[in-house]
Amino acid sequence: MRKGEINVSKILFVEPPRNYWFVMGEYLPPPTTLIILAAYIERELPDIDIEVLDCQAERLSWRGLEKYIESSNPSMVLTSGFTCNAYSCARTAEIAKLVNEDIITVVGGIHFSSIPEESLIDFPEIDYIVRGEGELTVVDLIKTLNNDRKTMSVKGLSFKNNGNIIHTSSRPLIQNLDKLPYPAYHLIEDNIKHYHFSMMAGKKTRYMVLEGARGCDHRCTFCTQWHHWGGRWRSKSIKRIADEIEHLNETYGGVFIWLADDHFKINLRGKNLYRELKHRKCKEDIMLFLQARTDDVAKNPDLVKKLREIGTYWIMCGVETPAKEILKEFKKGTKNQDAYNAMKLLRKNDVFSHAMFVTGARRDTYESIEKLRQFSIDIEPDFSIYTALTPFPGTIYYETAKKNGWIEDTNYSNYDMAHAIMPTETLTRKEVQQELWKCYQKFYGSYSKNIAGVFSKNKLKRTLYRHMAGQHVLRTFRRLI
């Protein structure tokens, strides 16, 4: 593109076609990352025309996306995704370039932020990678392009220049998240009625996602979040979180609201969120989903009870494994007793307990995974999800695995935690996959347990077990072996 020809006047945010994660059943989430970013650009650059295209909600194929780009005629196409969706993001950029090679293609998110050099080499259709937090960087990029300045001055960018790959300096994080506008749900208002999570809340319950905090101050070796956000945990104020919950409920009819914070921090925020929501009408209508550490749940019984009173129906905890040496390897910092106490406390307060487990750590053996299976039954969660340890780019585990040649599957489409990517010291990759299937078979394969679940008095539990039977999860995992 010749100097003076660039003018960003219209941005098309794209949630590309992709596959659902079969373990969680049929669901359709809103494109949260895109509408958070779109809201900020809309506020800061009001002269820019902005569209958000959700191919999932609008059931558009790749050909449908191509036709939409042709008719929309944007000057910039922007998309974002996780590692397992990296190829979908790249294909979106490729289609944009096929429609018009002058369209500026921008991608972001943890995957591309973690390996920008590799991504720019593998996907030449990508013009710019936004590393880290996107709001300030994208606005700065647009202003720089429209004023014919050099993009080397824009912090947080990676791009090609005359055959060379340029990584500008990292951009400092936003200090006050309360200054961000509400996500731009108004840009996808026609699709809001479609967003749902069948297994968790039913297909007719409107599903929305709320970002209450960014990052994590723990250092789990398999997790991408803490590194991506600079090892810091930043929270919106409790009043802002409560206001946003109320806004989603009263303005858009959001009922099932997933707080996307990787660590809710019940001890720090539970009491204040209770105080903010207890007198608000919306608490009678909402179903909150939180993610919390087992130790944080176990140590705060009074706060768990209060959170249930303001609409918290579901809490997910990363239990990971009962093996102390593997927990230490993961730098998890929790104890087995925390898991027992957390699940018991959630049951006592009628909060649906969701436990996450990880198989395939380097030290895992047949015996250790069998102990994990039994442990997952002993602590009695309502719902267990078992995953294969996945070396996501941006994690300590990725760097270690890459250095030592452990990674046997480099197809990012399989980085969905359902496919085994690496062997252990004693198990082949196929054997790890087989052990993962056995985890689901043991927890969900009991006829008596399934019958009890299907006819449970707890509506969430009934929905879950009908899903696990109807979605043929066990058969799907069996086919992966």
Image (cartoon, rainbow, N blue to C red):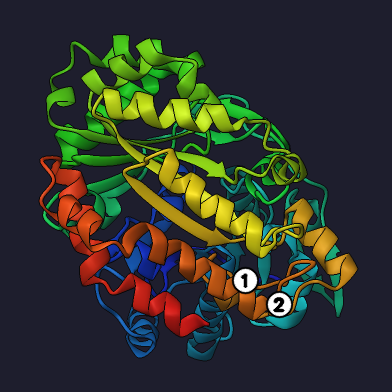
Q: Is residue 410 left or right of residue 309?
A: right
Q: Is residue 50 visible?
A: yes
Asked if residue 350 is positioned above or below residue 359 in the image, the reply reads above
**Circle 1 Cα neighbour tier, 10 Å, few/some/many (<14 / 14–19 / ≥20):** many
Q: Which of 374/150 is in front?
A: 374
- Quarter of the image for residue 190 reads bottom left
Which percent across, then down, holds residue 80? 53, 62
User: Which label was assigned to residue 432?
Assistant: 1
Which percent across, then down, holds residue 416? 53, 67
Asked if residue 108 is positioned above or below residue 278 in the image, the reply reads below
User: Which label was assigned to residue 428?
Assistant: 2
Which percent across, then down, holds residue 215? 60, 37
Residue at horizontal 33%, vertical 85%? 61
Query: Callout 1, which amino acid?
Result: Val
Q: Quadrant of the N terminus?
A: bottom right
Q: Is residue 420 visible?
A: no
- Quarter of the image for residue 231 reads top right
Q: Which of 412/132 is in front?
A: 412
Which percent across, then down, holds residue 192? 20, 54
